[in-house]
Amino acid sequence: MPSAIPSAAYRGDDALATLLTEAGTGRSPADVRALLAGVLAAPEGEEPAAWTVLVGENLPPALTEQLQALKTLMAAEAPADKPGPAQRLANLRAALKRRDLDGFIIPRGDEHQGEYVPPRAQRLGWLTGFTGSAGNAVVAADRAAIFVDGRYTLQVRSEVPADLYEYKHLVEDPLTDWIVAALPDGGRFGFDPWLHTIGWVEKTRAALERAGILLVACEDNPLDSVWQGQPPAPLTPVVPQDDAFAGESSADKRARLADELGQKGIAAAVLTQPDSIAWLLNIRGADVPCTPLPLSFAILSADASVELFLDPRKLAPPTRAHLGNQVRVRPVEEFGPALDAVARGSARVLADPSCTSAWIVDRLHLAGARVERDGDPCALPKACKNAAELAGTRAAHVRDGAALVRFLHWFSEEAPKGTLTELAVVERLLACRRENERFRGVSFDTIAGAGPNGAIVHYRVTPETDRRLEPGSLFLLDSGAQYLDGTTDVTRTLAVGELDPALAAEMRDRFTRVLKGHIALSTVRFPQGTTGSQLDVLARLPLWQAGLDYDHGTGHGVGSFLSVHEGPQRVSKVGNTVALQPGMILSNEPGYYKTGAYGIRIENLIVVRPVEPASEPEGELAGAERPLLEFEPLTLVPIDRSVIERALLNDAEAAWVDAYHARVRESLSPLLDEAARRWLEQATAPL
């Protein structure tokens, strides 16, 4: 539960200076205001007063009260950025003209290519109004376009002005074709080399040069020069992740990975993904929404030492002690010179081309490094969870499941009345999860889609779009949580009372086909070496048989109190060469979406495990010639039986539903009160 924020008035800088001196913090009011500027540029989080540790530990209550009062005052004084979308676009065009640029690209990502970016890096949203998690805007002198994928084709039209931007598909409409058509012959097209990978730059440069257009790396971002009130970088405390949850010390992880680098003759690896750094060093933070990580860069050397680049103000003494002598903390401003140093002597330096910015790779090359383009060395070991991480995530899913059942019990009584709205549902579910002491926030913004909003794959409710849940309709609820011991992600599609007779048969048909695909993926056994892309068809086949499909991946990797979207594994139509391995956690989430009517998705998290022949019925695996893997469901939440068309399920599929529900009932009943337990018994009754 978030800490209560004091309502005391701020008594002024002189009073604060006295309190800071009396507490021996060594801080001035100016220092505190600088800290607070970064704190206010970060998510509020579940513990709004946690930032005060950056001022000092064990602060007197009077000082803590005044620090919080100053925070409230500064939040109220935050300047508003007044220009509207048309003026922002005009200002950017003027900035491009001053730099002799005929066009410029604005990506959704930041310097780390992360899914969640801090307010400072939300350039695409500031310019266009688009709030999705993937996309690009391209601005030329007299044209502009926004490119999004199939998840956002509906959302982009509701958020981005059609009179300013053309709507384009990120995959089906080649970005370079648009640039060539929009720019004059010999044109100069700009990009920020911090915000694009080296692979993107090389591919785009080659395509544009064939058309006589020069791709120009900007020394600083032109958009930043016209963004009035652009927030500073976020500033939140970095905290240790207990080894009991991590299952392996940071020193052991560093030694293991460094040994692999040394065996390959690689001097160092440049790490740009903050979740990899958080995993490697067993640290967590709160710089961005939904994912508990500190934004940072790192260099892991073959001697197992690490240089960590972040704002040193984020580190309280206990975290510095946790990091130890082999981890040297340096300001981000020193990252460039550090790259120069590690490149000396034509050293071999590893950089992941899928997530390392062009600026970094170019700097390494200029300093003489032999850049080895290979995957992030943390990615695969991070994905293969150890025994402690798996025990933690199983425990987290039990508690999360109990919170969901308490919510679903409430939903079953309130939704049919026709008075609930999407926002009310989101708030109630959050309250249920907050009853858990290990809860540290949601793992992504809850998707609560009533009726036609459920067809918007990544819909996010706002006060402007808040829709009432109408009896007879379907409601899609996709949510997840961050716990100290695990990360959850679950989707359930719920009937709001009795389904509308006019659509009930169609809804049940589509729901059951989605369920059949979900079961097919849940129950498959596959030989070692199989990739997720080889299994994707199993989840789609029941829909394909009716001429239906969905325009998103079937499954993504999930971290351990880290990113809810984690690589390198996935289940998708898109080819993936990473074989599934024991300990990998993935989502299983086929769906169906009827634009303007309803959406359906059923999602559990599953973990890869070996098939144990000894546990099988006699003779079933007697002829097996290869070791097999299978999935264990982690999510423990009932599936709405009222929307299942039993006739479409075969006996094995119906038996899976019954067995899954029996496990849900057995696991969660001890954590529920009598009323919720009775509801769960009915919700998990055999088909």
Image (spheres, rainbow, N blue to C red):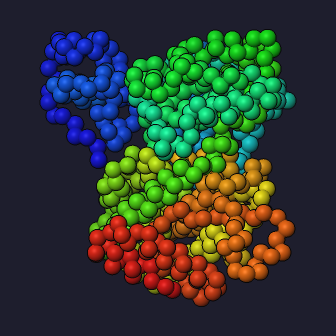
Q: Residue 497: x, y in percent? A: 38, 78
Q: Is residue 181 above or below residue 55?
A: below
Q: Residue at x 56, y 40 (%)?
A: 248
Residue in the picture at 54% in, 49% down:
389
Residue that protrudes farthest toward the front in the picture: 614
Between residue 304 and residue 283, name the one nearer to us: 304
The residue sitting at 48% across, 77% down in the picture is 662
391 lies left or right of 106: left
Q: Nearer the viewer, residue 173 or 429?
A: 429
217 left or right, relative to 153: right
Question: Where is residue 586 drawn, in percent x and y?
Answer: 61, 56
Image spot of residue 539 (x, y percent): 67, 68
Q: Quadrant of residue 32?
A: top left
* Residue 290 shows in the view: yes
* Image quadrant where residue 112 sits: top right
Query: Is 139 left or right of 239, judged from the image as shown?
Result: right
Q: Give how far across and how far down residue 80 sits, in percent.
A: 34, 28
